Image (cartoon, grey):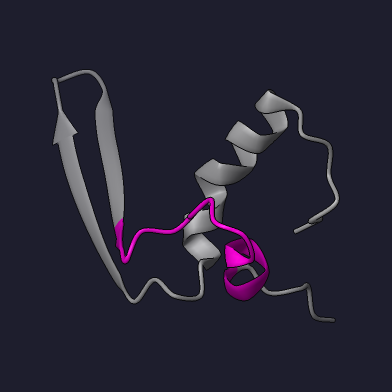
Amino acid sequence: FNFTCSNNDKTISAVKQKINVVWKSSTELGVGLATDGNTVFVVGKYKPAGNMNSAGYFEKNVLPKTE
């Protein structure tokens, strides 16, 4: 994750959708699945929740890329 990326709302929103997958402090995942007959809906809930907006949380929970 590039911690110096622009503060563009579209960029931040797109990134937040994916960060929970790699959030270091999250230790549990619940997944729900439903359908209306045409569309399948999948929801994931993480515990503890990620994407906390307090100072330092991203740096502590989204680790740098490794080679």
Residue plotted at (79% across, 56% down): 3
Q: How many marks?
A: 0
Q: Quadrant of residue 14?
A: top right
Q: Quadrant of residue 33?
A: top left
In the current view of this chain or complex, which residue is farthest to the front?
55
Q: Nearer the viewer, residue 60 or 33?
A: 60
Q: Residue 7 appears at what percent x and percent y?
A: 77, 34
Residue 44, placed above or below residue 37: below
Drawn side of residue 26 relative to residue 10, left or right:
left
Magenta stretch contains residue 59: yes
Q: Nearer the viewer, residue 59 or 65?
A: 59
Q: Residue 20 appears at what percent x and percent y?
A: 47, 57
Magenta stretch contains residue 29: no
Residue 46, placed above or below residue 66: above
Drawn side of residue 35 relative to residue 25, left or right:
left
Q: Quadrant of the N terminus?
A: bottom right
Q: Residue 18 appears at what percent x and percent y?
A: 55, 49
Drawn side of residue 45 relative to residue 8, left or right:
left
Stretch of the chain drawn in magenta: 46-61
Residue plotted at (66% across, 36% down): 12
Residue 20, placed above or below residue 9: below
Residue plotted at (28% across, 40% down): 42
Q: Quadrant of residue 61?
A: bottom right
Q: Quadrant of the C terminus?
A: bottom right
Q: Residue 35 appears at what percent x and percent y?
A: 16, 28
In the current view of this chain or complex, which residue is farthest to the bottom?
67
